Image: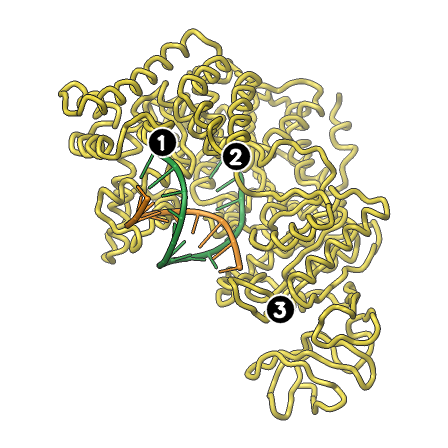
Chain colours: A yellow, B green, C orange
Amino acid sequence: MDASSIITSLNDDQRLAVSAPMQAMLVLAGAGSGKTRVLVHRIAWHIQVNQISPYNILAVTFTNKAANEMRHRIEDLLETPAHAMWIGTFHGLAHRLLRQHAKQAKLPDTFQVMDSDDQLRIIKRLMKNLNLDDSKWPPKQAQWFINAQKDEGIRAKHMQDSGDFYNRQMKDVYLAYEDVCQRSGLVDFAELLLRAHELLRDNEDLLAFYKQRFQQVHVDEFQDTNTIQYAWLRLLTEGNNNLFVVGDDDQSIYGWRGAKIENIFNFQKHYPEHGIVRLEQNYRSSGHILKAANTLIANNDNRMGKELWTDAGEGQAISLYSAFNEQDEAYFVVEKIRQWVRDGGLRSDTAILYRSNAQSRQFEERLMTTATPYRVYGGLRFFERMEIKNALAYLRLSTNPHDDPSFERVVNTPTRGIGAKTLDDMRILAREQQLSLWQAALAMLEHNQLPARAANALRGFLNLIVALGETTKELSLHETVKQVVETSGLIELYKKEKQDKGEARVENLEELVNAARLFDYDSENAENMGELDMFLAHAALEAGEMQGEVDEDCVQLMTLHSAKGLEFKLVFLVGLEEGLFPSQQALDDAGRLQEERRLCYVGITRAMQQLYLTHAESRRLYGKDSYPRASRFLRELPQESIQEIRLRANVSRPAANSAPQTKSLGSKGTYKLGQPVRHEKFGEGVVLQMEGEGEQERVQINFRNAGIKWLMLAYAKLDAA
DNA sequence: AGTCCGATGGTTTTT
DNA sequence: CCATCGGACT
C-alpha cells in the first residue's frame, strides 16, 4: 500500500489533518465529520509514509470500545497487525505503566484495580472509624471530593489548610483513605491516572525513555480530558511538539466530572507551533438537522467556532410535538415508531433520548403495552453484578489476601457463621495494629481470642482462600474460576435464592467461567502480570456490556450522555422542558447552562434522517404535578426548519379543538413562538405556543410575573412588547 | 440471619 | 411517586 491510498478516500480537510507535518495538531472535528477516520488514517500515515514503527506510536481514548475500534481499523487499513502500538484508554495505559514500573510507582507487585463501588465501601468503613455521622457526612460526597482532588492532581498532604471545617474533615478522610489503599494494595480509577503522572514526573530516566519511545502521541475526544490527563500528555510530549489531538468543544458534556474544556484553549498556548484543522463537513445528518444544531450552539460563547454543513440536501423538517402530559408524550413517540416500522424501518434505527434515566419509564410502559421490543442502556454492567463481584473477590483474595474490601465482601458470603461480633473485633485489631483484616484474623486465631465456633468458621474461610491460591498455580484460568465459583459455595447460595433472580445469578457465574475461558491472555504485553491478575484487571477496567447481546431488532432508549458517538436514522429528543432539560440545577448557572446546550447539540446531531422534539405541558414529577415551560432550547432553534405537530385533538387536552390540525410556526397569525408580548393585566411575557384558527385562536403565554396562561386571541388585549 | 418498615431523597457516567 | 437504605424486629 502506498501513501496515496491512505488519503484518497478523504475529503480536503481530513486529508490536511492526516498528511500534516509532524507537529502538534489540533483537529476540531464536528459531530459526524469523520473524526475517528482522521485519527486512524493519521496513524496509518505515520507508519506507511513517515516510516514510524508502530512501537513508537501512542494513541489514547476514553473508552475501551473506542480503543478497540481504533486498533482494528488501523490494522484493517494497514492489512497487518500492529501489536507493538500502544492504543488504549487513559486508565488502561496508566495501569500498564504502573504494572511495568510498580516499584518505582511505590506500589506492591500485586496491586489491584478497584472500581468505584469498592472505593465507596472503603470510604464508608473508614468514616465510621473516624466517627463521622454519615447523615452529616455522606460517604458519597467524600468519595466525590477525593476523586475531584485526584483529578486535579492534588494529594491529601498537598491540600491547603484553608481553614474551613468541611475541608479539614475531608482532608482527614482523604489521608486515611490513601493509607488504607496503600496498605491493601488497591488503586482506584483516579489513582491510576495520578500515579502514572507522578511516576513519569518523578523518574527522569523513565520519562526520557517514554518520550523517546512515543514519537507520535494521539488523543481522541480531547475536550473530555481532565487536568491530570492533560498534565500526563504534556509530560510525554513536552518539547517534542508531537501531540495530535482530536476533539469538539461543542460536544464537551462531562465538565461536571472534571473534564476541562479549557484544555483545548490551553493547547494553543502550550503548543505554539501547532497546526489546526476544522472538520465541518457532516456525513450523517440532513440539512435541517444541521441547521438546527448550528443555530442552537451559536448561543454559546467561548467557542472555537465551527459550522457543520452537508451536501446531502435539506431532508425532512424537524418535528415538534407539545404533549399534554408525559403519557401523551410516550404515546406519541411510540406511535411514530410503530409507523416507522410499518413503513419498513428497523426499530434499531430509532432512539429515544432523554436527559435523565427516570424518564425512560413512561416510554418503557408504552413500548411494553404495544409489544414493541426495546432496549434500555445504562444500569448494571456484567462485572458490576453482585454475584460476579463476589466471585471476583474470592479470586482477588487468592492473589492478595490483604485486599480488605474483598475480604469484607465475602468473608461471610455465603454465610458461614462468621458473625458481626467476630468481624468487629477483627476490624478493631486491624485498625489498632495497622494490619490487614487477613492478618488480624490470623492473629486472633493464633491467640485463641475467639469462641470455638467462630474460630472454626473463620479458619474454614482462611483455609478456603489459601486452597484457592494453591489450586490457581496448577489450573488454567477458567478452571480456577470454576473452582472458585463452586468451592466458595456461591453457586449453592444462588441456587437456593428465589427462582428468577437466583437462576440469573447462577447463569451469570457460569458466564464468568466462560469469559475466563475466552479470555485472551497476551503474555507478551502482560508486563509482569500472571493470567489471573490480568483477568482481574480486565474485569475492573472493562466492566463489559450492559446486557448480553440481544440480537433482536429493538428500539434504543438512553440518556443523551450515553448517546454521544452514536447515530440513528430516527431520533426522538424528549422532555424538552425548563427544569428537566436544561436541568433544574443548571438554570441559574451560565456555565452549566452552556453545557446543557452542548448536550442538546449532541442530541440533535445524533439524528440522520428525522428528528422529533417533544415536551409535555404537564408532567408528574416526584409525585406531584408540574407545569413546566417549554425548554429555552426550543426557542433557540431556527423556526423555518421546524414543523409543529398537532395530531390528536381527541386527547383529554385542556383545549381540545374540533379538528386535528398541523400548523407551521409563525406561518400565519400574528404571533410567533418566543415572541415577547405585553398584556394589560398580566404584564410582560413570551409566547410559548399557539393553537386554533380564527375566532378560536389561542396563545399560551409565559408571563414574567403572572405565570403561564392560555388566552383567546379574540378577547385578550395583547401588544407586541 | 433474614424480612419488613419507615425515612429519605431524587442529573448526567467511564474508567 | 418510587427506589434505596438502614434500623428494628422476628
- Per the image, label 3 sits on a secondary structure element best described as strand
Residue C6 percent location from the top left of the image: 32, 48
Q: Is residue A148 visible?
A: no
Let me know if marks 1 and 3 both belong to one chain.
yes
Q: Identify residue for label 1.
A: A409
Q: Label 1 is placed on what type of residue?
A: Arg
Q: Are marks 1 and 2 in contact (CB under 8 Å)?
A: no
Real-space Cα distance between discs 1 and 2? 20 Å
Residue tagged 2: A501
Q: Residue at x 80, y 80 (%)?
A: A669
Q: CA distance from mark 1 to mark 3?
A: 45 Å
Residue at image x 72%, y 60%? Answer: A292
Quick check: marks 2 and 3 in contact, CB under 8 Å?
A: no
Res A672 visible: yes
Q: Amino acid at mark 3?
A: Ser
Does dot 2 land on a helix, a strand or a loop? Answer: helix
Quarter of the picture containing the C terminus of chain A is bottom right
Give the residue pinned by disc 3.
Answer: A618
Mark 3 neighbour density, 10 Å: few (under 14) some (14–19) many (20 or more): some
Q: Residue furthest right?
A: A343
